[in-house]
Image (spheres, grey):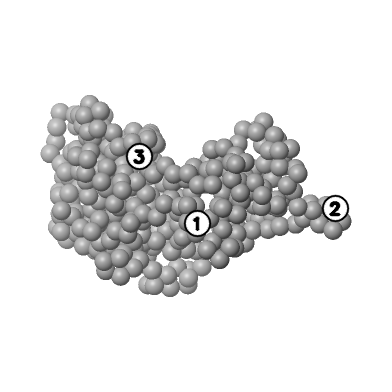
């Protein structure tokens, strides 16, 4: 194994250098705040670097040359769920380091490959036998986009431009499943990526100030995601965990065969609004033969094990416009936000055909370094 490459010392090294993060003393990942559009490169002092926003699990890789650990965004260990990455990264990394990046799962044939969030989410399983099986059937990849330490030198205090240059040197010649996220300093290229790369399953673009140090837990980066709206049929609502008011609205769309399918939920209501919604929706509540509220449950999954999946069913007559970023199969990828009621629309007119479908784009082209 080649010895680790270390950055050149500078005068800043003498001024309380940051400690090297470790698996036992992990660092909180730097975060991003949402902006509406891709910012110009000169909108931030020192300029911006742009890169794709990967749709996976945020992962921090701690490699000391002998043992490799992977921590999640919340510093929870992910190591046991991805044994294939532990083995591969230990073989491919040239020396001790701490990487910030994304665990993703690639699916599809060459020329039509894309990220698969659903398959990736299934990798978090309590059974060791299942973990081992999936590590072979659906192996994950790691896309690195920042270098936090190299050897026994912390890079947290260094500007991103320097960290990125060091990362490129460290991963020069790296092979799958270890990848280096591509970057550009051209805002127009980033705007093109925002449109094209969605077809490969990516969910936006991230802009990073080139002059900024790594600030754990701070929203220093900027993220741009798609902003879309859809008119959905209201299927029901879940009662808030407090027992008072509406916790979330259940949404549906009609498929081409006329079947109404559950596509996700909308939440984030104020205390006052939760109570108002109960009154507003009272006339739509379905009742059983005895006059009580009819019982309804959503399908269970391994994520809902032990959770209350019951909801108050509503007659599918009211339409609500919601804001969303992307779809994953036939469901909204993330919780959506309510925009307004659409009393001018008939529920039967709310189908999947209204949704924007991004043009297909091969993930392999995204991962190829220019």
Q: Residue furthest left?
A: 8
Q: Residue at x 84, y 58 (%)?
A: 289
- Looking at the image, tell me whether mark 2 or mark 3 is earlier in sequence order: 3
In this rendering, which labeled residue sits more in front, label 2 or label 1?
Answer: 1
Residue 45: x percent and y percent? 22, 26
Q: Secondary structure at mark 1?
A: helix
Q: Residue furthest right?
A: 290
How would you rate the neighbour count of disc 3 (Cα within 10 Å): few for under 14, some for 14-19, many for 20 or more?
Answer: many
Q: Is residue 265 visible?
A: no
Please, is residue 196 above or below residue 217 in the view?
below
Q: CA distance from mark 2 to mark 3?
A: 49 Å
Q: CA distance from mark 1 to mark 3?
A: 27 Å
Disc number placed over residue 291 in the picture, else none: 2
How would you rate the neighbour count of disc 1 (Cα within 10 Å): few for under 14, some for 14-19, many for 20 or more?
Answer: some
- Looking at the image, tell me whether mark 1 or mark 3 is earlier in sequence order: 3
Task: Classify residue 89 as left or right of residue 105.
Answer: left
Task: Classify residue 195 as left or right of residue 370.
Answer: right
In this rendering, which labeled residue sits more in front, label 1 or label 3?
Answer: 1
Please, is residue 88 above or below residue 314 in the view?
below
Quarter of the image with the N terminus is bottom left
Q: Secondary structure at mark 2?
A: loop
- Residue at label 3? 223
Closer to us: 150 or 323: 323
Closer to us: 79 or 271: 271
- Residue at label 1? 352
Closer to us: 301 or 296: 296
- Looking at the image, tell me whether mark 2 or mark 1 is earlier in sequence order: 2
Q: Secondary structure at mark 3?
A: strand
Residue 123 is drawn in which quadrant?
A: bottom left
Residue 353: x percent and y percent? 47, 56
Task: Classify residue 283 as left or right of residue 334.
Answer: right
């Amino acid at each position: 194994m080649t010895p680790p490459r270390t950055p050149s010392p500078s005068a800043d090294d003498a001024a309380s250098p940051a400690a090297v993060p470790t698996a036992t003393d992990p660092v909180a990942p730097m975060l991003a705040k949402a902006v509406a559009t891709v910012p110009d490169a000169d909108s931030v002092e020192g300029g911006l670097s742009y890169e794709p926003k990967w749709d996976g699990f945020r992962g921090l890789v701690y490699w000391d040359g002998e043992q490799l650990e992977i921590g999640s965004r919340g510093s929870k260990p992910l190591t046991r769920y991805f044994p294939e990455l532990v083995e591969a990264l230990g073989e491919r990394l040239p020396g001790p380091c701490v990487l910030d990046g994304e665990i993703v799962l690639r699916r599809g044939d060459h020329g039509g490959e894309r990220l698969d969030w659903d398959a990736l989410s299934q990798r978090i399983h309590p059974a060791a036998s299942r973990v081992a099986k999936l590590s072979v059937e659906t192996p994950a990849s790691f896309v690195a986009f920042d270098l936090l330490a190299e050897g026994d030198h912390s890079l947290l205090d260094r500007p991103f431009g320097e960290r990125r240059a060091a990362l490129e040197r460290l991963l020069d010649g790296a092979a799958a499943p270890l990848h280096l996220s591509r970057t550009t300093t051209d805002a127009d290229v980033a705007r093109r990526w925002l449109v094209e790369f969605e077809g490969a399953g990516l969910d936006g673009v991230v802009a990073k100030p080139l002059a900024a140090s790594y600030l754990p837990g701070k929203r220093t980066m900027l993220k741009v995601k798609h902003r879309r709206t859809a008119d959905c049929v209201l299927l029901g609502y879940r009662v808030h965990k407090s027992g008072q008011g509406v916790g979330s609205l259940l949404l549906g769309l009609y498929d081409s065969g006329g079947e109404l399918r559950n596509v996700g939920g909308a939440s984030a209501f104020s205390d006052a609004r939760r109570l108002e919604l109960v009154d507003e929706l009272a006339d739509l509540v379905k009742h059983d033969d005895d006059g009580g509220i009819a019982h309804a449950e959503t399908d269970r999954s391994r994520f809902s094990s032990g959770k209350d999946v019951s909801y108050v069913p509503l007659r599918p007559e009211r339409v609500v416009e919601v804001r969303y970023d992307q779809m994953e199969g036939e469901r909204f990828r993330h919780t959506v936000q309510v925009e307004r009621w659409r009393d001018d629309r008939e529920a039967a007119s709310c189908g999947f055909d209204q949704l924007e479908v991004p043009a297909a784009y091969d993930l392999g082209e995204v991962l190829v370094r220019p």
